[in-house]
Structures are given as C-alpha cells and as structure tokens.
Amino acid sequence: MNAQKEADILRCWRRNAGAWSTAVRTKAIASRRLVTDDTILAATASRQPRTVLDIGCGEGWLARELSLLGIAVTGIDATAELVELARASGGATYACMTYDQLSLGVLDRRFDMAVCNFSLLGLASTEMVIKAMPSLLEPSGTLAIQTLHPVALEDEPAAFRDGWRPGSWGGCGKGFSDPAPWYFRTLEGWTSLFRDAQLQLLELSEPRHPETGNPLSLLFILAAPS
C-alpha cells in the first residue's frame, strides 16, 4: 500500500505540474501569499548559507528568490515537467531526481543548508530524505522544513495519529485534478524521525495567519550531527 501511494504522489504532480506552476506564479494560494512563502525565505536567509539544496523545488520559485540574495542554489524535484519550468526561468542549477536517488548519494556533495518547503509528502520518501541529511549537509549545516500544521486536521477523528490522508487542491485555484494522498506526521512523529537521523532540533515555530491568528504551518530548523 505504501509503495502504491508513493507512486500516486509522483503521478499526481506530473499531471498537475502546469496548474501548480500557474498557481504559484500568480500567487493564487492565500496561505502562501500571506505567510508561508515569506516564512521559508526568511528562515533560510537568516542562516546566511552560501549554498542551499532546495529539495522538492517544484517550478523553482524559492531557488530564484534565494539566488537574488547571492546564494548558490541547487534544486531537485522528481517531476520532470516542473524541473523544465524551473530551468526555463533560471536562477539556479536544477536536476530531475527522486528522493530515493538523493538518498543514494547521486549528488555527491554537501551544502550549508537544505530546505524542504511543503515537499515531504510521503512515508518512505520522507524518511529517505531525513536519513540522508548527515551526508548532504556540511558539519555546521542546517535543514529547514516547513509542513502542514496538525490543526488543519483537527476536525478528523484520527487527526493526531500518523497515517496516510486523502489529498486536496482546495484553495489552489483552477485546473487541478486527482489530488495525491499524503502522509501526515504528528509532532511526535516528526521528532522521532529527526532523532533517528541524529538531527538536533534548533527551532520550532508556528507561522500564523495575520488576521485570525490560526497556525498555517510548522517550521523546523535542524542541525546536522557535528
């Protein structure tokens, strides 16, 4: 079941690459426009990295923004259609690469910082990325992860249990079809994963909607083993 759901995630993003690029570039997603885009930009820039690995870079918006700050960015994504859109807009070095390939050491280099911005969606694929961090980060390197806040599922009976959830394109705009499943992790689930990978949690924050005060995401900043 897990392998099938991981495959469904990849197929979904390939089908919806064009719609996603349009939504991002037109700032159609309110939570991103109001809070989460600036959150991940500020969190990354504040660490003053020279090199950044953007994992699940999509159509490249974050890589382009970071490059304007003088940061050398490498973006990877498993969706060839999104990587081509990113390359067409420039600003960074891009590669079409699965998380499995990343975990196997295909890049063969280290970075000052890695960033996963709402891009850890599966079960095994997420574990691969986290466990690969010690070999991808410099000894003083950091990892930033922004992900959905558990409050988004508070109306579900099993809201605070790790497990697969049905996807949704709600709030993303038009042109989307067949949302992919995604694997939800509780705070306990995330911290257990970090501990197993020997990553140290440096910061945990809950970026909030400027009007309602509701949390829109979780932001983790982690340090690689020294």
Image (tube, rainbow, N blue to C red):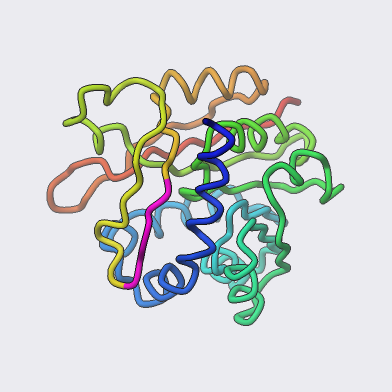
Whether residue 178 is in magenta: the answer is yes
Please give left or right for residue 33 compared with residue 119 in the image: left
Can you give x and y, in whole percent of width and height, for residue 222 in the image? 58, 33
Q: In percent of the image, x 36 and y 63: which residue is there?
A: 177
- Most extreme residue toward the bottom is 88
Q: Residue at x 41, y 26 (%)?
A: 163
187 or 103: nearer the viewer: 103
Counting from the top left corner in percent of width and height, residue 184 is at 40, 32
Residue 218 appears left or right of 144: left
Please state the horizontal and vertical placement of residue 3, each as a whole percent of the image: 59, 35
Q: What predominant SS class does the magenta segment belong to? A: loop
**Whether residue 95 is situated above or below residue 10 in the rendered picture:** below
Name the residue at 58% across, 24% down.
Answer: 194
- Residue 15 lies, with reference to residue 1, above or below; the image says below
Residue stretch rendered in magenta on the structure: 175-180
Left or right relative to 162: residue 80: right
194 with respect to 171 (left or right): right
Residue 172 at x, y = what percent? Answer: 30, 63
- Whether 158 is among the magenta residues is no
The correct choice, above or below, for 43 with respect to 183 in the image is: below
Q: Which is more toward the observer, 210 or 198? A: 198
The answer to which quarter of the image holds residue 124 is top right
